[in-house]
Structures are given as structure tokens and as C-alpha cells.
Amino acid sequence: MTGSLDTAAKAKLLRTLLDGGLPDANGRFGPFGGRYIPETLVPAFERLTEAVHTVLHEPSFQAELSAELTDWVGRPTALSPMRNLSRRWGAEIWFKREDLAHTGAHKINNALGQALLAKRMGATRVIAETGAGQHGVATAAACARVGLPCVVYMGEVDMARQAPNVGRMRLMGATVVPVVTGDRTLRAAIDEAFRDWVTDPAGTFYCLGSALGPHPYPYLVRELQAIIGREARAQMLAKTGHLPDCVIACVGGGSNAIGTFHAFLGDPSVEIIGVEAGGRGAALGDNAATLTTGRPGVLHGTYTLLLQDADGQIQETHSVSAGLDYPGVGPEHALLREIGRVHYTMAGDEEALALVQECSTYEGVLPAIETAHALVGARDYARAHPGKRILVGLSGRGDKDMPTLQTTLLAHDGVLS
């Protein structure tokens, strides 16, 4: 669709977004978004939408959320200069350290906010989907904190490659349900969570983990994750006196990226780059680079960019990172690509694994494999723009990825037999 809007139309959409006019009353970010759901879920979505608009920004709710983010999650997270990578890459590299948040990733910001909202709405149970397991862990922790039972749907493939997170969820009292249908990854887990919700739309709260799905989820998740960018923007100004020249984050469904990007969208001097999973190649089915190669369609209740064949059939994806292995993306990202405010690119499996090792070796920071895709983008941007100030959204830590790393980097290096 890129190119279908003229410059004035793109500028108007960006201004409307920055002024709080998007999504509109129908949940649309320009042409993207909306709500495509079964009739049985309409009352549940109407209740959720009303709660989002009446409770989310209510002072007492914000005070409770802020206190929990400070005292329990550990916010604000650090903004760290990466001096060794800066020397290696020839630019000024800064990490916004969501890996230091409770449970090890940005996911806790959203899960905690939604768990508190579920409690306010009188829900009797919370369900969630997870791919890399970080949203599942965050939801399990948040539900334990607020006192609600939690069920997490997780694809069988992802359970095998993210075994440490499965154990963490169960230790925190969550029931983890293996999904053995479909592609047995994140897409199938979302399908199963929606099927569960249909059986009890009144008592169940679905804690969706990314900035996708039917309205109001893309807006709700963005609002809960926008604290990342607000903190980072203030921290950069306090530490350097300047905004970054470039902000970079990895993109799967898109919650950490939209949370990091949002505070900088109105700064024309700041270039913004999202990095998707390039997998093992450019062919359909070999990657999860939706914004780079996708076409518009409807998946999981929203109109957005998707990886689909010529007949409109959603395709299985591939990525070494479970958290990026999804054939769609949040509708706000689709709009930002359409209007040209954010540039989206991709990094392959081998590149990402190499950056896990480089970051770990030279900075003592073990990033999640998902996050390492953003590091590929940061390295490439630094080499093309020497001396620039680059902010990387370090979305999570890599402890969860040790089973994968033991069969790739460590085994290949002869560290493990």
C-alpha cells in the first residue's frame, strides 16, 4: 500500500495520531485496525472498550499502576551507555534496559496494567497467549500479584524451545496449556485463547500480549508500553542534553517497539527503525518479516499487514526467535510504515545469533534473541552513520533462550558437547 497516500495525507495522519485522534471511534489507525470478531464476543469487547476509556487514565488507577511499576516492576529501567559496542561500531550506543524489569522483559508493563484492569472489571480468571514465554511469565506474575487465576496457551513448538519460561509460569501458579494444532507456535496459541474466551466472555479477561488484535487491544497495549519511550526520552535528554539521532527496536507483534517509538514520533530529527525477523531467507515461509514483505488482510480480529499467499491463505513463518515468529503485526505499525514515519527492515537468524554473542562478550549483557535483531539494525545503522547517537530498545534478556543457544552458538563453539 505504500505510495497510495500523498505527502499531505501522510502528514495529516501522523498529526492525528500524535494528537490522540487515532485510533478513531471504530478502532482504526488510518486504513488499518478495526474489530473483526464473532458475535458472541461483542459484549465482552464493548465492556473492555468502556473500561479502557473510563478506567485506564483515571487518577486512582494510574496511581495504583505507577506504584506497582515502581515498587514491584522496578521502573524506571536504566538507560545504559554501551561503550565497548560504541567503539566497535563507531557510533554512540545506548540501551533502554527493559531486560532489567521484573520477569526480564518489557512484557510486564502490559501484563500488570491489564491484570489490574481485569481486577477492576470483576473478572474471575485471566487467560493469555505466549510465544517466547515472556508474556506468559509476565501474566502469571501479574495475576499472582493481584490474586487472579491464570491460564496460558502456548504452542508445543515454543514450549520445547522456551522450556525455562514454561517452568517459571507453572511455579507462579499458572496453568500452561500446550497447543498442538496449527503451526503450534504463537498464531495457534492466540487462536486457542480466543476459543477459550468465547466459552466465558463475561467472567474471563483475555490479557493479549502485543499491540495487535481487535480494538481496543492495539491502543490499550500501546498506552501501557509507552512508558518505555517516555522514560528513554527523558533519560537521553538528562544524560546527553540531546535526543537520539536514531531509535531502533525489534518488531514481532510490535508492543516493545510501539512503546519505545511512540514518544519520538513527533520529533522530526529522530529516525526510527523497526527490525523484523528475516529468518533463513526472503521466501514466503522462511521469515516473519510482515512489514517488509506482507500484504493487507484480516487476522486475529484486525486488518493489518500479513504474510499470506496469492490466495490470501496465512502462511507459516520461521524465526529462531519464538517471540518474533508471527505472520502479522499491530495495525499502528502498519500505519507508521504506510506514512513513512518508521522504516522497517529485517535481520536473519544467523545475524541475530551473532549479535547475541557480540553483545554478551563485549558488554556483559545477554540479550534475548528477539532483541538481538534490533542490535543487527543498530550495528548496520552505526556503520552507515558514524558518530550518530543510537538508542536501542533492549526488550528482554536472553536467559530464556539458553536451550536454543546451547544447540547453536555454544555447541558450535565447542563449549558444550
Image: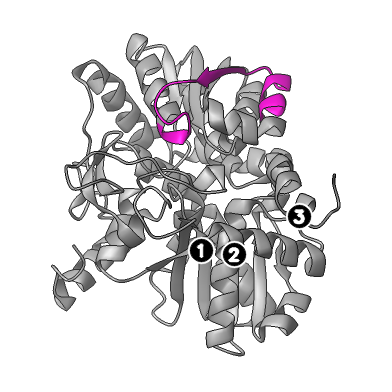
Instruction: Give residue 2's position: percent from left, percent from top.
Output: 21, 67
Disc 1 and disc 2 in contact, CB within 8 angstroms: yes
- Residue 145 x %, y %: 66, 25
User: Which mark, by number, is residue 351?
Assistant: 2
Q: How many marks?
A: 3
Mark 1 or 3, which is nearer the eye?
A: 3
Q: Which residues are magenta?
A: 166-187
Q: Residue at 52% of width from left, 67% of height from top? A: 248
Residues 326 and 110: in front is 326
Q: Is residue 115 shown left or right of residue 287?
A: right
* Left or right: 344 in relation to 148: left
Q: Quadrant of residue 67?
A: top right
In the rendered structure, which amino acid carries the disc numbered 3? His
Cα separation, mark 1 vs mark 3, equals 21 Å
Residue type (three-letter) at the residue carrying disc 1? Ala
Left or right: where 166 falls relative to 225: right
Look at mark 1 in the image and give the residue it sits on. Answer: 347
Quadrant where the N terminus is found in the figure: bottom left
Q: CA distance from mark 1 to mark 2?
A: 6 Å
Q: Amino acid at mark 2?
A: Glu
Q: Circle 2 — which element?
A: helix
Q: Nearer the viewer, residue 390 or 114?
A: 390
Q: In the displayed structure, does residue 32 sit left or right of residue 119?
A: left
**Residue 360 in the image, given as x and y percentages of width and height:** 77, 61
